Image: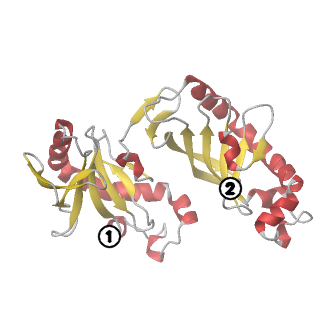
Amino acid sequence: MVKTINDPVFGELEYNENEGYWTKKIFLGILWEDDEQLDLMVKCAKNEEITDAQRNAYKNYISTLEKTEKEIPQLILSYFIDHYQDIERRWNLDEDLKIDVVDEDILLDGFDTKSLFIDRNGNYGWLVNFIWKNNPITVILSDDKIRIYEEWSVLVTNYERVDDEVFGDMVYDFGWNKSIKMDINGEKGVWIDVTAAAYPGESITQEQRNCYSEYLEREEEFLTELPNALMTYYLENYEQIDEWWGGVPTEYNRHNITKESLMELIEIHKIYFNRDGERYGWLCGCEWDDVHGLGITLSGDEIKIGWDESLFM
């Protein structure tokens, strides 16, 4: 039997015991089709009651919805343009999504809002499918400004954000995270994740702050040293790489490989800082091992390269 309540603010709700939230269908708003609905999801464990913070969040969402909808089209376009280089590299884009023709209307047509999620502390936002991405992203609506995060779990696992004295604006998602732009291998403005390891309830440590400051001071040095270190690793581990790759392509064999072509075979995804501050470095994808990738340790006297798990050990 489905459990229901009639809440003074939310109205009639049904309880989804498997997922742990109260839910009902609500109308999306004026920018979309009049009859388009989304799931309202109010996080609540089985024996918990809906909180006043959640009720106030819903009231605030309703009262600011018209303002939000006016801001969304330009926000989506700005986000798309700012992240276009990364989006184009990762996804096969239709012609109408190319940078020289895309506009607000095209992106809004592909802005598929699935649900309004309200966490226990009254943080709320939309879980949205974008036209170029299959998995939902998070659009936080409860902050001082609308924020977009690539991972849907940012809100579902209880949204936390801090303005750290060294890292700056960080959000918790299985560690403290943000994204920054880097110039890598001739490409300008490549988005890279920054992660300071932490379990739920843990803050960023001073050791992690010290490492991040050191990294920023030495980033150009690291990027300059990387091609030599990568070439050494590649040649020393060539037989194993050949096995992982199922045969090294001719242009990348030990006789033809160059530092420039080798750098094109890796992609830096994340700058990772261990909890104790003793180790930090880049987590990378690489063409010869799409399962493990590469871990490039930057802390210490010299760059060390191994599987990506090496940074966690």
Which label belongs to residue 109? 1
Residue matched to label 2: 292
Specify the amino acid type for callout 2.
His
- Quadrant of residue 126 in the image? bottom left
Establish if 244 lies above or below 169: below
**Which residue is at the front of the view, 103 or 312?**
312
Q: Position of residue 53 (x, y in %)?
A: 20, 37
- Quadrant of residue 217 in the image? top right
2 or 1: mark nearer the eye: 2
Residue that sits furthest to the bottom in the current view: 95
Which label belongs to residue 9? none
Q: Residue at x 89, y 52 (%)?
A: 236
Q: Position of residue 65 (x, y in %)?
A: 19, 52
Q: Residue at x 27, y 45 (%)?
A: 45
Q: Is residue 238 left or right of residue 305?
A: right
Q: Residue at x 79, y 61 (%)?
A: 261
Screen quadrant of the N terminus: bottom left
Q: Residue at x 41, y 55 (%)?
A: 78
SS of the residue at dot 2?
loop
Q: Is residue 298 left or right of residue 90?
A: right
Residue that sits furthest to the front in the current view: 1
- Quadrant of residue 116 in the image? bottom left
SS of the residue at dot 1?
helix
Specify the amino acid type for callout 1.
Asp
**Which residue is at the front of the view, 276 or 280?**
276
Q: Position of residue 63 (x, y in %)?
A: 14, 47
Crowding at dot 1, Cα within 10 Å, few <14 / some 14-19 / many 20+, comes out as few
**Which residue is at the front of the view, 1 or 190?**
1
Screen quadrant of the C terminus: top right
The alpha-carbon separation of the residues under discs 2 and 1 comes to 37 Å
Q: Position of residue 62 (x, y in %)?
A: 16, 49
User: Looking at the image, is mark 2 or mark 1 earlier in the sequence?
Assistant: 1
